[in-house]
Amino acid sequence: MVIMLELREFLGKGFTLIGQVDSARTVDAGAIVSAVKSMGKVQAVIVSEPQGVLGAANTAVVSGIVKRETEVEVVCQITCRDRNRAALVSDVLAAKMLGVDCFLITGGGHPKLSDTPQAMAVFDLDPAQLVQMLKHLSEKGETPAGHKVSGPLNLCVGAMASPATSPIDVEAKRLERMARIGLDFIVTYPTFSLEALRSFKREVKQLNVPVVVGVRMLPDVRDARRLNEDPRVTVPPELIDALERAERLKGEEKVEACLEANLNFFEGFLKAIKEEGFAGCSIHAPGMEHAVGQLASKLKN
Amino acid sequence: MIITVAKSDEEVRRALEPYRNIVVIGCGTCATICRTGGEDQVKEMVEKLVRWGKNVLASMVVESPCDVRIDRRDLKRIEDEVKEADALLVMSCGVGVQAVGEASGKRALAALDTVFLGEVEHIGCFVERCRECGFCVLNETEGLCPIVLCAKGLMNGPCEDMVNGKCGVVKDDVDCVWVKVWERMKSEGREEDFLRVNPPLDRSVKVGVGRVVW
């Protein structure tokens, strides 16, 4: 049996470098593909739904296009927010047809917190139920209702986790619940705190599921301040200061200074994550995807 | 308890626009407790209708307007007025409005909005507790209903919007129900129960008009 799940293999061997790109409310797949290409050499790329935006192009389709155009292993993020169980199966099968094997499950932020707050929050399934359904599909070749699906599936299924949430024990138990069903990997929401990651790792160590740390680069100081509004995220003051100094510059100089500020901080941060024994990192750099490759090359040096 | 709130005067007035001869019906059960359809509110409504130039033929508080048998019995007392009325303005939940319409054969108008099934903390404070999903999971969730208490209605929470044990969706200092479920299980040494995956709801149960017949 040929298993095309490169990610699962990568995650067992050393530190895996993953890029992350958001889908968008666009018909221009070229921009998303270019962003992925600009990342340089990453072992996989997560195609995610943009935070707070409803109605972005379907990640299953975008994942398929990215896979075809870049030949990078793609992880398709699927949320429970907008689709019932039938639509979720439909998307996964369509993505699989397009060569996508890996799925990253998340509940998805409530529409009330999005740019389309009037929309219905579907949540026909929750993440645990969706993981269960995908595992069932993958292992038995049928939906939980017993409807056969033709063709081998061999899905690789991961889930998102909040490493800096509190209480952390309940988050660990939530993950354990999914791990018992069969999680292939975990990707954390971005955090800038090594301390939070260490305690998270202690909590989930016994699950024996590879943990990929979500890293979020910051295109400018406004983005940093916006992220800081989330009580679970604390952007380090030295990074904010550096971005603030960059803000005083103009044009290319400003862009360069922002990039420099990010690289300076994240080089050390990523090296520390690697030393802590995490399975890898997923670097999300919205609007500055070329920085992913630059950061990755620093890690190799 | 079915919790109701009064519709605005403007909305009630607009609904009554085509009608002149009105009978006002209150509710002696839930709407009385909610102070939206008891004796006092019916009296105030009658006064209002008179000010609006309506001809109020009769008014009464029916013990349980949601029970068609009781409507038939009680409306007999004002049979002539009901017969003569253009419309009945019903100050009860939506069930009562429809049952009164069925019992009287008249156009029944709603004076209230039905907002939820809730418990009474005290008069003037009603809190939603049930969304009639058709599958009571309280036995599996420490007596806390996740359909109502979780903003996403998740059967296996918490979700990623939980912040410091609070619901990050509602953002009103509301505890995350799944953290409470976990804490209750943990305090009783039943951590293993939290790892059980509650199955998805069978949505087919709530299709069409619910009916219990025996």
Image (cartoon, coloured by chain):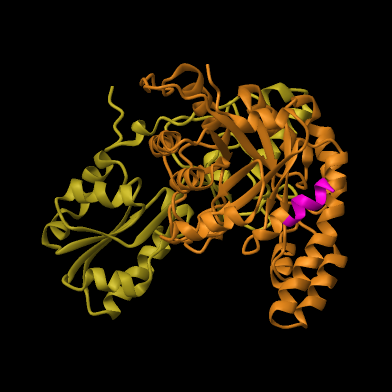
Chain colours: A orange, B yellow
The residue sitting at 47% across, 62% down in the picture is A116
Whole-percent x and y of residue A295? 76, 54
Q: Nearer the viewer, residue A119 or A36?
A: A36
Answer with left or right where residue B143 lies relative to residue A219: left
The secondary structure making up most of the magenta span is helix
Q: Is residue A214 among the parts visible in the rendering? A: yes
> Is residue A297 found inside the magenta-colored segment of the image?
yes
A190 up-or-down from A204: above or below: below
Q: Is residue B204 left or right of residue A251?
A: left
**Relative side of B192 to B119, left or right:** right
Q: Quadrant of residue B42?
A: bottom left
Is A234 covered by the magenta stretch?
Answer: no
Looking at the rendering, the stretch of residues picked out in magenta corresponds to A294-301
Residue B76 visible in this rendered orientation of the protein: no
Q: Which of the 4 image quarters holds residue B16?
A: bottom left
Q: How many marks?
A: 0
For the point 25% across and 41% down, the residue is: B68
Horizontal and vertical percent for residue B105? 14, 50
Q: Is residue A17 above or below residue B59?
A: above
Residue displayed at 70% across by 39% down: B180
Dividing the picture into quadrants, the one containing residue A290 is: bottom right
Q: Position of residue B202 (x, y in %)?
A: 41, 30
Q: Nearer the viewer, residue A87 or A75?
A: A75
**Residue drawn 43% across and 38% down?**
A98
